[in-house]
Image (cartoon, helix red, strand yellow):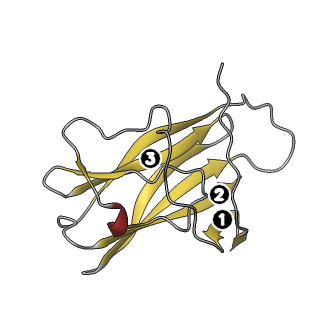
Amino acid sequence: MVLVAGCATGGSVASGSGGLTTVTSTTSPPPVTGPAIPGVHLPAGATPVAGSQVNSSALPATFPRTAWLEHDGTVLGFYGEDGGCFTSSATVAQQTDTRIVVRLVQQEPGTGPHACPMYLRYKPMSVTLAKPLGTRTVVLELAIVRG
């Protein structure tokens, strides 16, 4: 059995109300180097998005930074997390001529005791763009919803 754990080198700031918490990193995560994360890879036929075109500094350091395009550049793919007590979804929060903001949403249970299986997996996710990505920057954000 292999156990994978990660630690962030910087702090994070959480803010929000009404059960929604937006997490932003106060430092940039280290560049992705070393061995690949098991199960994280480009889907067959997908075109990778250059790392310089993806701003993932608002994600925890342990998130994969892999992004890709499908369907002539109109479908943007990336990885989100699923765990024993939470699920993930994604939505396009903003599309301009210079950038695409994608909000990853983790839905967690509310307060009180919860029996949750201890697992974490990365799942491929995608959003549909109004027009092909082209040279626009992809900004990945994370929002945590409790309750």
Disc 2 marks a residue whose amino acid type is: Val
Which residue is situated farthest in the right direction here?
113
- Whether tag 2 and tag 1 are in contact, CB under 8 A, the answer is yes
- Crowdedness near tag 3: few (<14), some (14–19) or many (≥20) residues, C-alpha within 10 Å: many
Closer-to-camera residue (144/44): 44
Frontmost of labels 3 and 1 is 3
Where is mark 2, residue-wise? Answer: 145
Q: Residue 42 in the image: state x and y as whole percent.
A: 31, 41
- Secondary element at image label 1: strand
Residue furthest front in the image: 34
User: Which kind of residue does numbered mark 3 sit on?
Assistant: Tyr
Q: Residue at x 18, y 57 (%)?
A: 73
**Image height of 6 relative to 141, above or below:** above
Across and down, in percent, residue 109 comes to 72, 46
In the image, what residue type sits under mark 1? Leu
Q: Is residue 95 left or right of residue 140?
A: left
Q: Residue at x 18, y 39 (%)?
A: 45
The kind of secondary structure element at disc 2 is strand
Q: Which residue is mark 3?
A: 79
Q: CA distance from mark 2 to mark 1?
A: 5 Å
The residue at the point 62 percent across, 70 percent down is: 24
Residue 88 image point, x, y percent: 53, 47
The residue that mark 1 highlights is 20
Above or below: residue 90 compared with residue 119: below
Of tags 3 and 2, the one toward the viewer is: 3
Q: Quadrant of the N terminus?
A: top right
Q: Position of residue 13 (x, y in %)?
A: 71, 72
Choose between 13 and 86: the one closer to the eye: 13
N-terminal-most mark, 3 or 2: 3
Left/right of residue 11 with respect to residue 64 in the rendered view: right
